[in-house]
Amino acid sequence: MTRLEEMLQANEAYCKNPPVDYTGEDVHESKLPKKKIAVFTCMDTRLVELLEPALGLKRGDAKFVKTVGNTLVGPFDGVVRSLMVATYELGIEEIFVVGHDECGMAKTTAKSLIEAMHARGVDDAAIAPLREELVHWADSFSHPAENVKEVVRKLRENPLLPKDLKIHGLMLHPRTGKVDLIESGDA
């Protein structure tokens, strides 16, 4: 059975007996985050069932945006666009940038990515126009806590986001769930 078939089979079983609070018209939950916050974090699989309870969050409390290493690549990239919608359309008042210890992005390099891309059949002609950006992006990430500080700074300075938006920086340990404050948006 393929992974796709496994997922579709699991979905069929799930739909036969969904959790009661997920059925019918959802009058309790809204697309609007109850706590008026957005969390920008890493896509690390260890965070999937750890992050929300470690931060005291439940379904519907926050909007979540995830990228590798919770990195930003530009002032109008997909993360910023998501945070703009969360701010202007969904009413968030605070952003929590959450990095984590043991982040795999800290070990990723442009060289390792390019080698893996070549091994999977990506032609160098496709990589060449992006090589400089790839080097800057991948090779500049080596310290997750420093990345959190940099992302918080970039978001605070982004002219597309309002100045009254509180932006915090946190670090999470993926084995203990311990959260450390890196930057407070309350200061």
Image (cartoon, grey):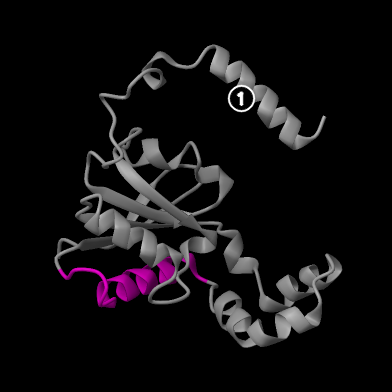
Tell whether 24 sits left or right of 183.
Answer: right
Q: Is residue 133 above or below residue 72?
A: below
Tell whether 153 sits left or right of 166.
Answer: right
Q: Is residue 127 above or below residue 19?
A: below
Tell me what residue is drawn at x 27 percent, y 42 percent.
33
Tell me what residue is drawn at x 30 percent, y 62 percent.
84
Which of the two residues, 186 or 17, is positioned nearer the viewer here? 17
For badge 1, the amino acid type reads Asn
Which of the two residues, 108 or 4, is positioned nearer the viewer here? 4
Q: Position of residue 69 (x, y in %)?
A: 52, 62
Q: Position of residue 51 (x, y in %)?
A: 42, 42
Q: For the C terminus, which image quadrant? A: bottom left
Q: Position of residue 120 (x, y in %)?
A: 83, 65
Q: Position of residue 9 (x, y in %)?
A: 69, 23
Span shown in magenta: 143-163
- Magenta includes 130? no
- Magenta includes 157? yes
Quadrant housing residue 34: top left
